[in-house]
Image (tube, rainbow, N blue to C red):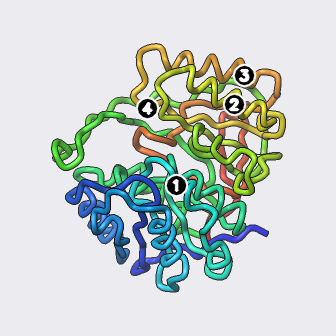
Amino acid sequence: MLFAPPRLRKGDVVAVATPSAPVMTPRRLARGAEALRELGYEVRMGPLAAGGVQNATPDQRVDELNRFFADPEVRCVVASLGGLNSNAVLEALDYDALRADPKIILGYSDITTILLAVHRRAGLVTFHGPTLLPELAEYPQILPYTRDKLLRAVARPQPLGRLTPAEEHTDEMLLWDESDDRARRLRPGDGWQWLHAGTGTGPLLGGNLETIGLLAGTDYLPDLTGAVVFLETCATDIRVVEQSLTQLRMLRVFDKMAALLLGRSFRAPDGFETALRQLVRSTTARYRVPVVAGLDIGHSDPMLTLPLGVRARVDARTRSVEVLDAAVR
């Protein structure tokens, strides 16, 4: 059974958890918290971020998450940022608490392991979208596309409907708490690129390409049969991407899926984007499902928020990606 969490309302408590990399930039952290307050939410900062804990153990990270999961006042748990090793918390998470009191779980990148595990073990819709750092702490404000797509997903009990590409994007890097006191430079968007024809309908499931592979053979990876699979990568070496795609092929993910959505590249060298599309096109050619690249998900900004477990339809003929069901109630 699929559980949709209650929608996020003005005045609700949004908790900030740190299950992955430590937060070492207090000014940017404070800016992200203030951005959430400006959206109308109360912010509850977890002790790992608030205290700038550098080397939190898995037990500390689990304890922080489970306290938020069990707190009836907390309606959303957003990751402070991604990083590495969030898979170390999966075995001790309180999935029963989330079944009893569903909450919005939000993040991306390394947080993919938690999104997929919570969906698999608790049956909960989870949300692949911005973390506090960097997106919600963007200077001078959250990018409008990121903000609007997030609120449509978590604050409105209606289907997202047809998704649209961002008109501008950026992957400019400004050092946090050093040079991030100006807006990043945006450049015109490239739109989405349709690599294979076809139509497909199924639940949205996916996340960071390399991170998904960490769950292979475990009880934390959902069944991808019939899924609209979405993938994003922060790799800049095409061989790394090929290695991860080969793993998914050997897991028979591509045999089972209804469609494939591929995120926009991040700070890739010249020629990488073309090589990536050629690699994905050739890897998926025999499966006869629609494949679209360049989606606004992943490590460049702005970004969509995609609800895991909610049905989507991909139609190459009309060049449309449509989310069919509400993600919150």
Q: Secondary structure at mark 2?
A: strand
Q: Earlier in the sequence, mark 4 or mark 1?
A: 1
Q: Which residue is mark 1?
A: 86
193 in relation to 221, above or below: above
Residue topped by disc 3: 283
> Residue sitting at 28 percent across and 62 percent down?
52
Considering only order in the chain, which callout, 3 or 1, is on the residue closer to the N terminus?
Answer: 1
Tell me the crowding category of disc 4: few under 14, some 14 to 19, or many 20 or more residues within 10 angstroms, Cα based: many
Residue 329 visible in image: no
Please provide percent x and percent y for residue 265. Answer: 48, 30
State which tag comes first along the sequence, 1 or 2.
1
User: Which label sits on residue 2?
Assistant: none
Q: Which residue is mark 4?
A: 266
Q: Residue at x 62, y 79 (%)?
A: 97
Q: In the picture, residue 105 is in which quadrant?
A: bottom right
Q: Quadrant of the N terminus?
A: bottom right
**Mark 1–mark 2 distance (CA, rounded to whole Å):** 29 Å
**Dot 4 lies on which element?**
loop
Sequence-wise, the earlier of marks 4 and 3 is 4
